[in-house]
Image (cartoon, grey):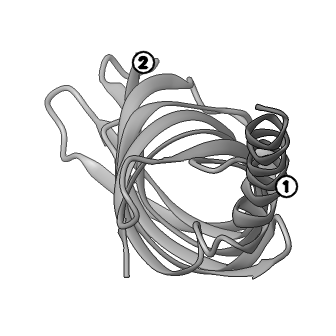
Amino acid sequence: MGMIKHATLAILASAAFAVPAMAQDSTSFTGPRIGVEGGWSRVGGEHRAGGDGFTYGATLGYDVAAGNLRFGPEIEVSDSTQKECRAIATGGRDCERADRDLYAGARIGYVAAPSLLLYGKGGYTNARFSDRIENAGASDMDSADNRSGYRIGAGAEYAVTRNVYVSGEYRYSHWSSSIHQNQLLAGVGLRF
């Protein structure tokens, strides 16, 4: 009986030490990944009227492991339905719209559980903003400009399987002339 008790304790002790070792040696959240995302966004700043919209896009990244840390580059292209119009003195209206957004940066994360990665990100963003002045009884005028700036954010990635993940993220972008954007996004992606 004593021998079985000691053997059982030895097995339990081995299992207790093996679980953290397996988690630490795990290569989860590594390698190339591609994902799509969508969610709420709000643009404001400068003379812009501001407004809410739906942002959608695709991300490509690569993650490298260093213990429980994960880090690597990522790029993204996204677009938005955000549009806000206001009346102008001529009787028409000025409609401001957020268009495509190109992002290149990096993220660093921590594997908090075998299926959960918590991360922060930062990088360069170049966004296009359009204005359309609709004059009552006169020709309309269109203009657009590209703005450079930065993006920071934080999020969580959950591994549904070894190759499929879901994510949630908050991010803040800031461009020239104090134009800024807040976003809350959800995504799904594949790791290869």
Q: Residue at x 56, y 25 (%)?
A: 50
Q: Which mark is residue 124?
A: none
For the residue labelled by badge 2, is the local secondary structure a helix, a strand or a loop? strand
Q: Position of residue 49 (x, y in %)?
A: 56, 23
Task: Provide the secondary structure element on which disc 1 rests.
Answer: helix
Task: Name the image quarter holding the C terminus.
Answer: bottom left
Q: Tell me which numbered mark, 2 or 1, is placed earlier along the sequence.
A: 1
The residue located at (63%, 50%) in the rendering is 114
Crowdedness of circle 1 by 10 Å Cα count: few (<14), some, many (20+)? few
Task: Quarter of the image for the N terminus: give it.
Answer: top right
Query: As rendered, which of 90 and 151 lies closer to the eye?
Result: 151
Q: Depth check: 61 or 84 in front?
A: 61
Q: Which residue is mark 2?
A: 86
* Coordinates of residue 160 in the picture (x, y in percent): 38, 47
| Residue 169 horizontal side relative to residue 97, left or right | right
Q: Residue 92: percent from the left, percent from the top?
A: 30, 23
71 lies above or below 111? below
Near-viewer residue (129 or 192) = 192
- Indicate left or right for 109 with 156 as reference: right
Residue tagged 1:
17
* Residue under the point 65% across and 70% down: 26
User: Is residue 135 visible to the viewer in this orientation of the structure?
Assistant: yes
Q: Residue at x 56, y 48 (%)?
A: 115
Give the residue at the far left of this rendering: 137
**Residue 150 visible in this rendered orientation of the protein:** no
Does residue 62 lie above or below 37 as drawn?
A: below
